[in-house]
Amino acid sequence: MLYPEHEQTKEAGMGKVLTGFTMSLDGFIAGPNDDIRRLFKWFSSGDTPFPVPGTDMVFQISSASAEFIGELWGSIGALVTGRRDFDVSDAWGGKPPYGWPSFIVTHNPPQEWLKDGSPFT
């Protein structure tokens, strides 16, 4: 297993930090114009429906992927990402992905987002 097994308990005093990144075998993350469809084609190429938490999306992935992602995502408490991801995703339509609290690391937060509760760090 790529990620350690994680069991959430109220007694846990220290969380685990996992890092992950997706890229193609040739080292690219996105195609021209930040197109990521080819890289994430596997989100729609399986036979197992996988409802994406916090969204209306449903992936169609393999049963092995659904089991793995279900375990992994069930252990995640927050998303830390960068400003570029925020911008390319068009701020996820104003709704953080997967229903997780999100923190966007940047030196230049967008002025219209500067308010209490802003996800920028």
Image (spheres, rainbow, N blue to C red):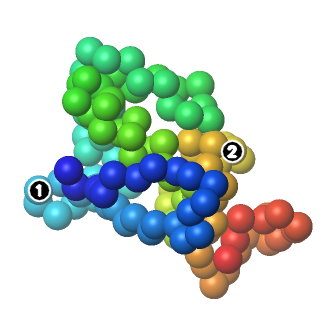
Which amino acid type is marked by label 2?
Lys
The x, y position of residue 1, in whole percent, is 20, 50
Quarter of the figure with residue 80: bottom right
Q: CA distance from mark 1 to mark 2?
A: 31 Å
Residue indicated by mark 1 = 25
Residue 37 seen: no
Quarter of the figure with residue 53: top right
Residues at marks 1 and 2 touching, judged by CB atoms closer than 8 Å? no
Which amino acid type is marked by label 1?
Leu
Residue under the image location 30 percent in, 57 percent down: 4
Whether 76 is drawn above or below 57: the answer is: below
Quarter of the figure with residue 24: bottom left
Image quarter (top left, top right, bottom left or bottom right) of the C terminus: bottom right
Residue in the foreground of this view, choosing between 53 and 56: 53
Label 1 SS: loop
The x, y position of residue 29, in whole percent, is 28, 58
The x, y position of residue 9, in whole percent, is 56, 52
Whether 25 is drawn above or below 119: the answer is: above
Residue under the image location 62 percent in, 49 percent down: 100
Q: Determine whether, in the image, residue 82 is placed left or right of residue 39.
A: right
Label 2 SS: loop
The disc label shown at residue 95, or none: 2
The disc label shown at residue 33, or none: none
Residue in the foreground of this view, choosing between 3 and 53: 3
Q: Residue furthest bottom?
A: 107
Q: Determine whether, in the image, residue 14 is placed left or right of residue 7.
A: right
Q: Residues within 10 Å of mark 1 (few under 14, many from 20)?
A: few
Q: Residue furthest right?
A: 116
Residue in the foreground of this view, choosing between 114 and 55: 55
Residue under the image location 39 percent in, 46 percent down: 72
